[in-house]
Amino acid sequence: QVQLVESGGGLVQAGGSLRLSCAFSGRTVSTYSMGWFRQAPGKEREFAAAITWSGGFTYYADSVKGRFTISRDIAKNTVYLQMNSLKPEDTSVYYCAAALWSPSQGLGAVSGYHYWGQGTQVTVSS
């Protein structure tokens, strides 16, 4: 089992920044990658960013590339999402997820992840 706990969400003005954190415990040794997804009201959950746990390779959705940065602290079993130049369309519940092996669907697929956090709300005002 893997337990994921997100924090760092909140209300910010457009152009501002937030940093999300996701602390995880459990089967950390076997974690292949960590991802951040987001879901706005009435919309499907979508990929934002991912990082492979051992190699630190990063992947981003086009919508956040150049504005968001995913990173990890192996010693703390924590993954971060630094979000800069936030836009109102970034408003969503942000979820942290863990994949235990390389998903055949790719790191951007919701179905490729095995464990999810409870989500943290990010609201960007215009």
Image (tube, grey):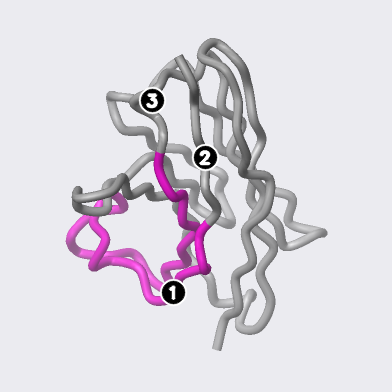
Give percent across and percent down for residue 67. Answer: 48, 18
Q: Position of residue 115 (x, y in %)?
A: 44, 75
Residue at left offset 40%, top offset 22%: 88
Distance, label 3 to label 1, CA atoms, is 24 Å
Helix or strand or loop: what does disc 1 sit on?
loop
Whether residue 94 appears in magenta in the rendering, the answer is: yes
From the image, state whether disc 1 or disc 2 is nearer to you: 2
Q: Which mark is residue 64?
A: 3
Drawn side of residue 52 relative to residue 111, left or right: right
Query: Mark 3 or 2 closer to N-term?
Result: 3
Label 1–label 2 contact, CB within 8 A: no
Amino acid type at circle 2 is Val
Circle 2 residue: 122
Which residue is found at the position 44% from the left and 50% from the top?
A: 93
Q: Quadrant of the C terminus?
A: top left
Q: Which residue is mark 1?
A: 100
Callout 3 touching callout 1 (CB < 8 Å): no
* Farthest front residue in view: 126
Q: Is residue 23 above or below residue 100?
A: above
- Left or right, 126 with reference to 72: left
| Residue 112 disc label | none
Horizontal placement of 23 versus 81: left or right?
right
Q: Magenta stretch?
A: 92-119
- Camera-near label (3 vs 1) is 3
* Residue type at numbered disc 1: Leu
Q: Secondary structure at mark 2?
A: strand
